[in-house]
Image (cartoon, rainbow, N blue to C red):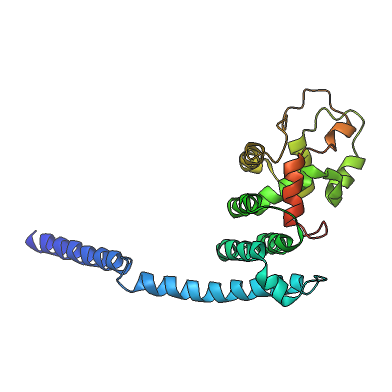
Amino acid sequence: MNKELENARKIQDNLRKTVAKSLVSFVPGSGLFNMLYDEIQKQQFVQRYEEWKQLIEERLTKLENKTAQEIIDNKQFATALLTATPIMLKTAETEKRKYLANGVIHALDKDMDETQLMIFFSLLDRYTIWHFRVLLFFQNPLRNKNARSFYCGLHFDVATVSPLDFFKQAYSLNEDKNDILRKIIHDLEADGLMEEGTWETTNISMTKQDLKGKRTNSFGDKFLDFILLDGQV
């Protein structure tokens, strides 16, 4: 009995030591955390920064009637670049970095004050790529190839198809995405980019013309114009 008790205590002591070592290894300043953070920051920073430079340079080379000195002296461009770069570093989505790069370039060729510029970059910072896809889709649903195909197969009475269903068909999304899509639509409505409306109700009189209708407002259109380049990503 004494031997069993002694063995049990040894096992408990070893377990405590193992857990203690594991906890210490993740305490900031202990080495492992700092090493992991530094390596991740180093690798991802270099990779994302190099891609960012390429995106900006590609767009700058397409500008006409802008000298290098004019670009350097443009305070709006400087504000846009300095604001967008930290946002770019926080996302792994290339699509979002392209939107950010387009916004930086538009700071050179669009007439907007710094307030509007900062609001747009704030939205770019908060939004996911699905926010952009939802907004872009409901500006013109039939711009999406899959949506056009689905739309052409519908009968005139489409009361069983809601706008949300239409979007999910275009992107082949399942019902488990409904909660996320509701949150995204709420964000876009709350930020004043889309008109408030009925998104899921199907027991209403809705024609094919209604289903393909534009749901973004003028502010939403301005934001899309800001993040797109010649209507493209």
| Res 168 seen here | no
| Res 188 seen here | yes
Task: Identify the residue shown where x is 80% and y is 70%.
Answer: 63
Residue 68, x across and y down, in percent: 72, 76
Left or right of 87 in this view: 223: right
Residue 85, x across and y down, in percent: 59, 66
The quadrant the C terminus occupies is bottom right
- Of residues 218 and 183, the one drawn nearer to the viewer in this rendering: 218
Task: Identify the residue shown where x is 82% and y is 27%.
Answer: 159
Q: From the viewer's perspective, is residue 124 above or below residue 189?
A: below
Residue 172, x across and y down, in percent: 75, 48
Q: From the viewer's perspective, is residue 158 above or below residue 43?
A: above
The quadrant the N terminus occupies is bottom left
Task: Identify the residue shown where x is 86% and y is 45%.
Answer: 142
Left or right of 205 in this view: 84: left
Q: From the viewer's perspective, is residue 108 above or below residue 117?
A: below
- State which quadrant residue 185 falls in: top right
Residue 154, x across and y down, in percent: 90, 36
- Of residues 191 and 168, the one drawn nearer to the viewer in this rendering: 191
Residue farthest left in this picture: 2
Task: Identify the residue shown where x is 66% and y is 54%.
Answer: 129
